[in-house]
Image (cartoon, rainbow, N blue to C red):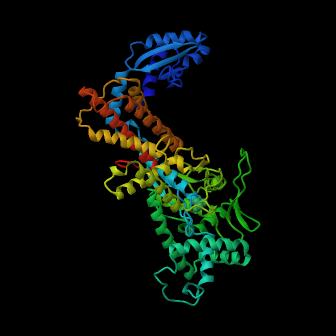
């Protein structure tokens, strides 16, 4: 389905052509002066130069021929040569009806669907999930949903950090605390216990204490490095212990992500690609791409037009250990083998940009991915506290995601309980509602900012029912649901031409659905969907305050309004689904 701008532009193009002007000048945009008109074309100004005429003359000529056009209600030439246009009310109402029966409200899916992998979440096993991983999960989930809505075949991979030094640290600490454990006995031949020798809360305490010790105690650190290398080389006892760490940690991660309504198709990690590393390194050497530099194996990736220095990509450290780049390159090999993706999108902290530049360039140079495979890095900024510094707990520690979510749920519960506890069947409903609304507060608070920017995590603002927030959007949806529940309406799908400015404005907002999703899709920009639904919700609320929908006696008018708000609800719901949250029945 063509969008409204394209339809208007087609009309304007026809006239430019009829008048002997190049139709490239017929570009139409949404007006930047909504007080004057709805759409505008500034092409007469540019055409004036080519045709050596006053812009207003050209504008007048065009406007004359735009009269009696079925798409436009009015067209006006304004000095020095703007063309201001308003859309025809009947045409607009028909367009909304068309949208409501079209697949995806007229948004056109990709004609050549791609296979896309979204690499997001990226938590590190054995370390507690903290707020730093929240952004990757929230943004990545939305990107995945948008890609898939656009018709692509999308796979989300959590890409666990499960093979690094943190594993060596945990093992070292365990060995100090419980040296008698069978995993540390080299001569042990039997089966290892099924049960892990620690719980998740113990594990969460073990890692930070090991990490702190390694910073002050050189011997401790070396022991941890050695343990990491022993693990990577397949020590039986360490592998068994590692499996316990994985099981305990991953089941906790699953719970946390489930709470966030974030779902991964794949739970792969760095450890899964070890087997590709030796061959990969050999190939890089054979192809004369990798060389020895002070004992490390590196690949040059700088390019002529680089504006800043891009250092070589290190493939192996001098002690032979693999690094972050090594596992990312090996993961590309595996992904290509198993899924043949056309595109991979990595969602990670923007401070990792250099790492991804190095990995992408090495992959391209070495032919690890096909030339046609698109590799994108979507880097996000830091989540700061109200003081503008990275978000911390009240006592300055790292905020655990679980605690953060619980705090927000509680805050939401108190609000809801205060407001309208009486309208809930029971306390369980209030609690469930509080958690649904809390999630919208967190996700919308994050997604409404352009990903690359740092933002301030302001619980008070995010949980407010007013302003540009998730709860406000949900409140709007719930309000529409409640009107629709009270109304009896026929299934007759007729939307009449708008009766008021606020009604027309609501219709105009609805027509922006497809172009908004299109640009959010092309630019990997969920924030565009947020600002769209904020405008749409405002347009609805204005219309609602000015219009007595349920008490309207003219049956066809009432039914038309009900249809209009039903479409509004459907579009809002579709958008929040793309953002990764949902609306409750009441709130
Ligand atoms: N585990 C990493 C971290 O916590 C993020 C992983 C991002 N994905 C990737 N393929 N490198 O920083």
- Residue positioned 61% across, 59% down in the render: 394
Q: Horizontal placement of 299 versus 191: left or right?
A: right
**Residue situated in front as seen by the camera: 50 or 557:** 557
Q: Position of residue 33 (x, y in %)?
A: 53, 23
Res. 326 image quadrant: bottom right
- List x then y, in percent, for residue 335: 51, 59
Tell me if I can see residue 31 in this picture: yes
Give the vertical position of 509 relative to 332 (above or below). above
Image coordinates of residue 440 in percent, x first then y, are 46, 49
Which residue lies at the image location 28% right of the left edge and 41% below the top edge? 485
Q: What is the quadrant of the N terminus in the image?
A: top left
Residue 242 occupies which quadrant of the picture? bottom right
Pick the front one: 454 or 64: 454
Residue 113, visible in the rendered structure: no
Is 552 located above or below residue 115 in the figure?
above
Nearer to me, 175 or 234: 175
Relative depth, front residue between 585 and 246:
585
Which of the four quarters of the rendered structure image does ligand 1 lie in? bottom right
Q: From what the image shows, is residue 180 above or below residue 315?
A: below
Q: Which residue is at the far right?
A: 294
Relative to 490, is 430 on the left or the right?
A: right
Q: Position of residue 232 (x, y in %)?
A: 60, 74
Q: Residue at x 59, y 55 (%)?
A: 367
């Amino acid at each position: 389905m063509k969008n409204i701008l394209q339809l208007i532009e087609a009309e304007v193009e026809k006239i430019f052509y009829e008048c002997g002007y190049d139709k490239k000048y017929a570009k139409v945009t949404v007006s930047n002066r909504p007080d004057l008109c709805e759409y505008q074309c500034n092409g007469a100004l540019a055409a004036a130069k080519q045709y050596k005429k006053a812009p207003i003359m050209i504008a007048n000529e065009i406007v004359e021929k735009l009269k009696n056009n079925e798409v436009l209600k009015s067209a006006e030439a304004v000095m020095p040569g703007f063309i201001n246009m308003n859309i025809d009310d009947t045409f607009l109402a028909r367009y909304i009806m068309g949208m409501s029966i079209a697949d995806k409200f007229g948004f056109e899916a990709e004609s050549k669907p791609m296979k896309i992998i979204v690499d997001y979440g990226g938590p590190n096993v054995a370390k507690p999930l903290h707020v730093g991983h929240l952004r990757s999960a929230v943004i990545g989930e939305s990107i995945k949903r948008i890609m898939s809505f656009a018709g692509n075949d999308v796979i989300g991979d959590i890409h666990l950090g499960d093979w690094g030094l943190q594993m060596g640290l945990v093992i070292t600490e365990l060995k100090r605390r419980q040296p008698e454990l069978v995993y540390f006995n080299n001569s042990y031949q039997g089966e290892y216990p099924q049960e892990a020798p620690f719980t998740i809360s113990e594990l969460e305490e073990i890692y930070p204490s090991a990490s702190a010790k390694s910073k002050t105690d050189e011997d401790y650190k070396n022991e941890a490095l050695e343990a990491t290398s022993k693990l990577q080389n397949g020590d039986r006892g360490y592998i068994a212990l590692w499996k316990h760490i994985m099981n305990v940690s991953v089941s906790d991660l699953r719970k946390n992500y489930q709470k966030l309504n974030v779902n991964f198709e794949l739970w792969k990690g760095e450890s899964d690609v070890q087997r590709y590393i030796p061959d990969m390194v050999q190939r890089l050497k054979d192809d004369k791409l990798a060389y020895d530099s002070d004992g490390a194996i590196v690949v040059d990736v700088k390019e002529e037009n680089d504006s800043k220095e891009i250092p070589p990509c290190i493939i192996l450290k001098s002690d032979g250990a693999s690094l972050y780049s090594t596992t990312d390159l090996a993961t590309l090999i595996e992904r290509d083998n198993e899924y043949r993706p056309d595109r991979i999108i990595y969602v990670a902290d923007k401070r990792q940009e250099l790492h991804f530049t190095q990995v992408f360039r090495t992959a391209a140079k070495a032919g690890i991915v096909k030339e046609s495979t698109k590799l994108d890095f979507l880097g996000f900024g830091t989540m700061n506290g109200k003081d503008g510094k990275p978000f911390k707990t009240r006592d300055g520690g790292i905020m655990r995601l679980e605690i953060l979510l619980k705090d927000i749920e509680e805050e939401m519960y108190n609000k809801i309980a205060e407001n309208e506890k009486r309208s809930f069947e029971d306390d369980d409903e209030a609690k469930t509602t509080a958690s649904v609304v809390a999630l919208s507060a967190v996700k919308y608070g994050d997604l409404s900012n352009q990903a690359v920017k740092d933002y301030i995590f302001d619980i008070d603002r995010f949980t407010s029912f007013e302003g540009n927030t998730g709860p406000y959007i949900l409140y709007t949806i719930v309000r529409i649901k409640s009107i629709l529940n009270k109304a009896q309406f026929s299934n007759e799908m007729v939307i009449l031409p708008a009766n008021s400015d606020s009604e027309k404005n609501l219709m105009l907002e609805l027509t922006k659905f497809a172009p908004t999703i299109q640009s959010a899709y092309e630019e990997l920009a969920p924030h565009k969907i947020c600002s769209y639904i904020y405008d749409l919700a405002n347009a609805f609320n204005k219309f609602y305050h000015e219009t007595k929908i349920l008490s309207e006696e003219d049956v066809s008018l009432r039914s038309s309004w009900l249809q209009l708000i039903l479409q509004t609800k459907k579009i809002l719901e579709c958008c929040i689904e793309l953002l990764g949250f949902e609306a409750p029945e009441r709130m």
